[in-house]
Image (spheres, rainbow, N blue to C red):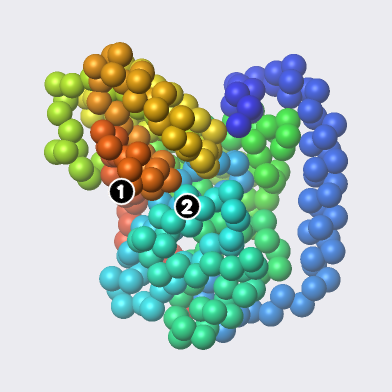
């Protein structure tokens, strides 16, 4: 992800790419207009979509897993749907390990498979921009720190849609323990007074596996690497170095050897995310640990009651 996407001001690079954003907006709007002529029949199963407008690092996959766990405990026969992308095998692997995952090359086929398996609730990880599917509940994930970046559309910025599109969605899940929450809350309300806003945050669940007396080298290839480092620092990890890779990065043996050599020189332990850890072969995992993180929802009961009111309409 280009760093200028998250500048607090419009950068020179953003200005250069702005004409391409206009082309993107034209193509996106044209596709949406053409899709409006299609007969998108409502599926015979309630569907929740957890997606984003900001590209990457908003917590939509952890949110999907959390909602799956909540509804499963409440007696729903719930499945998670994820459209198959070869570049997102890490997320597919995590979802497969933690949920009843159904994946295919199209979301329509995923719905068909869900009905065959006689599920009574489907949660899609990603897909808000897929206008071929009729969703009962549309949830948009944001991060309190990254928020909307520079506020520009791809490729001048990180936004997949204009912020006016919030009027089409049901609720925002704003992730983070940040002083920015109230400001972000009001900012979003300026675009949609009716949209519901809920706060989510990460909580480590295996802190006892780590010694705070040791030094740590962290590495990650996720959408928002600063989020991971922030969690470590907030929990008193002594981070002496970090190595950042692109989101969905596929680690090769040579990459891991360089990480281990760097850690040896610093006499530091190696720590990474669960999403990165699952991409590493069993053999190469030696001396690499991951911090397991759970997503929590403030006012969880209010969110679940809101979702249930939508799917029972």
> How would you rate the neighbour count of disc 2 (Cα within 10 Å): few for under 14, some for 14-19, many for 20 or more?
many
Answer whether residue 304 is visible to the viewer in this image.
no
Residue 118 horizontal/vertical position (percent) = 46, 85
Q: Residue at x 41, y 62 (%)?
A: 96
Residue 222 horizontal/vertical position (percent) = 48, 38
Q: Which residue is mark 1?
A: 294
Disc number at residue 108?
none
Residue 276 horizontal/vertical position (percent) = 41, 41
Q: Residue at x 52, y 83 (%)?
A: 115
Where on the picture, by quarter, is residue 1? top right
Total tally of numbered discs in the picture: 2
Label pair 2/1, CB-CB below 8 angstroms: no
**Does label 2 or label 1 sit earlier along the sequence?**
2
Where on the picture, by quarter, is residue 69? bottom left
In the shown orientation, is residue 96 left or right of residue 266?
right
Q: Which residue is mark 2?
A: 91
Q: Residue at x 41, y 55 (%)?
A: 94
Answer whether residue 255 is visible to the viewer in this image.
yes
Q: Residue at x 47, y 52 (%)?
A: 91
Q: CA distance from mark 2 to mark 1?
A: 15 Å
Check disc 2 and report its element: helix, strand or loop: helix
Residue 13 horizontal/vertical position (percent) = 74, 20
> How would you rate the neighbour count of disc 1 (Cα within 10 Å): few for under 14, some for 14-19, many for 20 or more?
some
Nearest to the eye among marks 2 and 1: give it. 2
Check disc 1 and report its element: helix, strand or loop: strand
State the residue in front, 232 or 138.
232
């Amino acid at each position: 992800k280009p760093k200028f996407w998250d500048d607090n001001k419009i950068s020179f690079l953003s200005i250069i790419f702005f004409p391409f954003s206009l082309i993107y907006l034209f193509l996106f709007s044209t596709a949406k207009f053409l899709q409006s002529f299609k007969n998108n029949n409502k599926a015979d199963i309630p569907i929740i979509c957890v997606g984003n407008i900001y590209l990457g690092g908003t917590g939509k996959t952890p949110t999907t897993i959390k909602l799956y766990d909540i509804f499963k405990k409440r007696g729903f026969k719930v499945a998670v749907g994820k459209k198959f992308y070869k570049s997102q095998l890490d997320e597919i692997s995590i979802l497969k390990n933690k949920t009843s995952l159904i994946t295919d090359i199209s979301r329509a086929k995923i719905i068909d498979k869900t009905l065959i398996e006689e599920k009574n609730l489907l949660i899609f990880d990603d897909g808000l921009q897929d206008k071929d599917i009729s969703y009962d509940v549309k949830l948009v994930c944001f991060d309190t720190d990254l928020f909307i970046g520079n506020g520009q559309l791809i490729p001048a910025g990180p936004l997949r849609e204009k912020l006016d599109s919030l009027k089409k969605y049901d609720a925002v899940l704003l992730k983070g323990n940040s002083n920015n929450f109230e400001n972000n809350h009001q900012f979003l309300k300026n675009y949609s007074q009716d949209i519901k806003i809920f706060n989510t945050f990460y909580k480590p669940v295996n802190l006892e596996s780590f010694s705070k007396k040791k030094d740590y080298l962290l590495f990650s290839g996720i959408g928002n690497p600063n989020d991971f480092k922030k969690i470590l620092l907030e929990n008193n990890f002594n981070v002496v170095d970090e190595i950042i890779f692109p989101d969905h990065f596929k680690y090769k043996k040579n990459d891991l050897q360089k990480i281990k050599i760097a850690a040896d020189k610093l006499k530091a332990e190696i720590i990474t995310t669960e999403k990165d850890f699952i991409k590493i072969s069993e053999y190469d995992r030696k001396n690499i640990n991951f911090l397991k993180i759970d997503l929590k929802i403030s006012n969880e009961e209010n969110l679940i009651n809101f979702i249930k009111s939508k799917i029972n309409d």
